[in-house]
Image: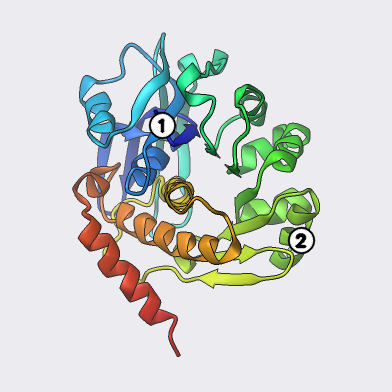
Amino acid sequence: MPEVIILGTLALDSVETPFGRKDNILGGSAAYAAFASSFFAKPGIVSIAGKDFPAGHKAALEAKGIDLTGVKIEGKTFRWEGFYEFDMNEAKTLKTELNSLAGFVPEIPDGYKSAKYVFLANTDPEIQLQVLEKMDNPATIILDTMNFWIQHKKEHLVKAMKKAHIVLLNDGEARQMFDTPNLVKAAKKVLSLGPYAAIIKKGEHGALLFTKSHHFNAPGYPLEDIKDPTGCGDAFGGALIGYLARAKSHDQAVVRKAMVYASVIASFNAEDFSLERLKQLTHKEIEGRYREFVQMRNF
């Protein structure tokens, strides 16, 4: 039975960066988040994939102990094509094909409903709300989103944020969501909706944590070689919820530590295309880089 339920997308991505191009690789917010979460807890995915979803991609997810009972199979898989220039903080979309995702209605297996940890990865906030309505009583809900939903479904997104314990936004999304250039003010507006914490991701520059009584800055890892940053934000969120599930707490001290582990996993993710680096990642490597993060914060 999964400890962490992850709602998000499963996708076939075609990505080009200054370091190469890969077509029809495993992608989607649920894939990245579940892979990252699996280093700390047992995740289960709620999503949809097409009949064209490669058996090798399914096997890669299952090899990490990820439960796929909540994945519906019908139609064609969601596809995304994009590229990065030398500013690797922003992907430029060339083509999006929603396919079976367009009519997706989530179904929650009975074995998922009692899970205490839920990550609502980037997807339609109406679907995020539908999933929460079907869960019994989660102890920790983390919500992520993107600028498209802020622009087109802000009212539903606000409703979903009010049900979350932790909200993730990148810096551009935080400014857009609350119409302010100041990230501190944006974070306070998140907290005013009811969440315990707001985390603002700043790409290669780390992430900021705000609660009503504390704030914290998790650094980014100074990578020399970045091949593909796709999914790093999703990996951050997945590792975050996975660590909190292992710790069975979302107190601010635990969240701080979870953020550093999340930054560690996200940094490894950027070292190769798709989930290739995370497939090979070991706990020894994770702990080694975690200690580097700790040393970076000592003064």
Q: Quadrant of residue 44?
A: top left
Q: Is residue 155 visible?
A: yes
Check the picture and name the quadrant holding the N terminus.
Answer: top left
Question: Percent position (x, y) of residue 193?
Answer: 79, 48
**Label 1 to label 2: alpha-carbon separation:** 33 Å
For the point 74% across and 64% down, the residue is 212
Q: Secondary structure at mark 1?
A: loop
Q: Amino acid at mark 2?
A: Lys
Question: Percent position (x, y) of residue 294?
Answer: 39, 76
Residue 188 numbered tag: 2
For the point 22% across and 20% down, the residue is 55
Q: Nearer the viewer, mark 1 or mark 2?
A: 1
Question: Percent position (x, y) of residue 270?
Answer: 33, 54
Residue 154 shown left or right of residue 50 in the figure = right
Q: Secondary structure at mark 2?
A: helix
In the picture shown, does residue 155 fall above or below 182? Answer: above
Q: Rate crowding at label 1 as few (under 14), some (14 to 19) or many (20 or more) other CA atoms within 10 Å.
A: many
Instruction: Tell which of 185 and 115 is nearer to you.
Output: 115
Q: Amino acid at mark 1?
A: Pro
Q: Earlier in the sequence, mark 1 or mark 2?
A: 1
Query: Colour mode?
Result: rainbow
Q: Which residue in the structure is indicated by mark 1?
A: 2
